[in-house]
Image: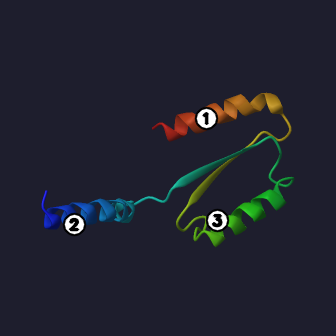
Amino acid sequence: MRRREFITLLGGAVAWPVAVRAQRTTPPVMGLLSSRSPNESADLIAALHQGLNEAGYVEGQNVTIEYRWARGQYDRLPALAAIWSAVRSR
């Protein structure tokens, strides 16, 4: 392989992930499954949003978060996880 071909190949390999990210039309979706209620998790949600903001993500703008709350009913967790899995597999 000649040097010019190698450099072209290497440049294409480096640029490909950037092009793939640029083509994304829908924001990434995160799921949060909690055994608690939204009110009990206010500090957790605030910390999550802060961490996402520090990484350049803002809920509703460039990331979507789907919340599932068991509200202290631990037996609901498997069903809530199954709902999340079914929604994401579409």
Q: Which quadrant of the figure contains the C terminus?
A: top left
Contact, CB < 8 Å: mark 3 with mark 2?
A: no
Which residue is at a point 58% across and 71% down the rendered structure image?
56
Disc 1 secondary structure class: helix
Residue, disc 3: 52
- Report the residue that reaches farthest toward the front: 2
Relative depth, front residue between 18 and 44: 18
Q: How is the image coloured?
A: rainbow
Tell me which corner region of the image, top left, top right, bottom left or bottom right, holds residue 63. bottom right
Q: Mark 1, mark 3: which one is toward the viewer? A: 3
* Residue 66 position in % (x across, y down): 63, 50
Disc 1 residue crowd, few under 14, some 14–19, many 20+, Cα 10 Å: few
Relative depth, front residue between 31 and 19: 19
Residue, disc 2: 7
Does 33 appear above or below 54? above
Numbered label attached to residue 83: 1
Which residue is at a point 62% across and 31% down the rendered structure image?
82
Disc 2 secondary structure class: helix
Q: CA distance from mark 1 to mark 2?
A: 47 Å
Disc 3 residue crowd, few under 14, some 14–19, many 20+, Cα 10 Å: some
Q: Is residue 34 left or right of residue 24?
A: right
Relative depth, front residue between 19 and 30: 19
Relative depth, front residue between 63 and 51: 51
Among numbered discs 3 and 2, the one appearing first in the sequence: 2
Which residue is at a point 61% across and 64% down the rendered structure image?
59
Tell me which corner region of the image, top left, top right, bottom left or bottom right, holds residue 42. bottom right
Among numbered discs 1 and 3, the one appearing first in the sequence: 3
